[in-house]
Amino acid sequence: MTARQTDTNKPSAGKLPLALIVATVMLDAIGIGLIIPVLPDLLLSVLPGQSLSQATIWGGILSSIYALMQFIFSPILGSISDAKGRKPVLVISLIVMIGYYLVMAVAQSIWLLLLGRIVGGITAATNATAGAYMADISSADQKAARFGLIGAGFGMGFVLGPAIGGLLGEWGPRAPFYAAAVLAALNAALSMFILPESLEDKNRRPFSLRRSNPLSALKDIAKFEGLAPLLIIFLVFAVATSVYAAIWPFFTLERFNWSAGMVGISLTIYGVCFAIVQGTLVRPAIKRFGEGKTLIIGFCFEILALFVASLITSGAFMIAWIPIASLGVIGQPALQAIMSKATSDDSQGVLQGVMSSLNSIAMVITPLTMTALFAFFTSTQAPFYFPGAPFMASAILVVISLVLFLRLSAKKQI
């Protein structure tokens, strides 16, 4: 019997393990988005006497360190799960995550917040393990749909995180973390007592530092002939579009004096619009225009969205602009499709690993650079007051991505 046949004959897992894995991934995403609406108030509470501009710098550091820990530890935890099993990694991560949320809830110094974000980033690096668990319990013809469930859980977490953070943030910047700790404790208990181990003994392999190297996927770029320019475009675009998560709470507080609740509502609206566009417009657009033209259309919408966002002075107009701004998201799936077609069938997994690594790198770069730009243009040292500077800079980055793509198209290198 071939490996493929064995995979096809895997017994179908019950609904509860599937639900618990999706819930774990969703909780990871909630942890990312939860802090966004309350971050300005939380930082100002532990940085007495400092301005919003100064606090914003620390916000960028906290966001980048969280993403960096995920980038470093995701392959490490995945490799550990190959050796010790999926369940121990998931359960221990959830238990430690409870402590992370409680630390964030009680921290009275910026250094304790920083320590909390380091631990939180490590414990949230379980996506690879969750994906491996899903692969363990799925037959070949089930995997695509079930990986889609993981993606849906992650997307739902990005919608729920800011919404929960904003709603509970009305009772103070610490409240969301207590709620998250309760959710993590419930998930840990269910995983500990109900979730079965998915990795069979015959499929375990010793822990390997080489496989745990987070840069290994990036080294594989050299294997893809002609793909490097597309990956550069992908990275530049990812850095640009990560500006929303990096700067949104600080920008809206400075520009519109929004509360944590209003920040959460606005991010939830964006998340819902994002999901609608991804779910209903991407496929028809690619079918009608093809990947290349869809990418160009998406990038143009993104440039317009970022440019207008940098200049908006009305909070009501910003809310009304969000559905239009979300149209820009059709560009990235088209770019991913183009890259996938430029890669051999036996290298698709490597390509996905490379793109995941580049996304992580973008989530490290953007908070540091864009918060520094915001802090400068809202400080007294700035040549002129311009809180929308990060959005303008991001618009320029998307323009650069579009120009690079058009040059590749003209040379027929794609």
Image (cartoon, helix red, strand yellow):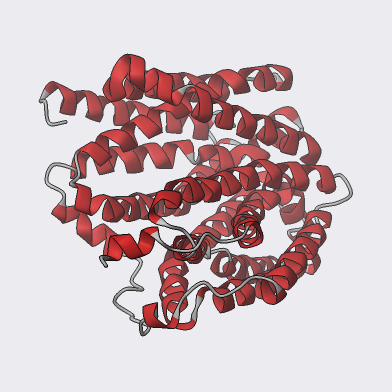
Name the outermost residue toward the right. 171
What residue is rendered at 31% in x and 31% in y?
A: 401
Frontmost residue, 111 versus 206: 206
Q: Is residue 300 visible?
A: no
In-image side of 133 versus 190 (left or right): left
Depicted 363 relative to depicted 268: above or below = below
* Residue located at (40% from left, 49% from top): 141
Query: Camera-side residue: 115 or 319?
Result: 319
Whether 155 is drawn above or below 89: the answer is above
From the top left corner, tell me how far across and down residue 326 is, in percent: 54, 25
Taking depth in this image into account, of 11 and 410 the one nearest to the observer is 11
Q: Is residue 146 left or right of residue 41?
A: left
Quadrant in which the C terminus is drawn: top left
Which of the 4 quarters of the picture holds residue 94? bottom right
List x then y, in percent, for residue 150.
Answer: 54, 51
Q: Percent position (x, y) of residue 143?
A: 43, 52
Q: How many marks?
A: 0
Q: Residue at x 14, y 54 (%)?
A: 223
Residue 413, by quadrant, is top left
- The answer to whether residue 244 of the structure is visible from this angle is yes
Name the quadrant containing residue 379: top right
Quarter of the image where the N terminus is located: bottom left
Q: Residue furthest front?
A: 1
Residue 304's x, y, as percent?
A: 46, 18
Q: Is residue 255 left or right of residue 360?
A: right
Nearest the camera: 63 or 92? 92
Vertical side of 256 occupied by 36: above or below: below
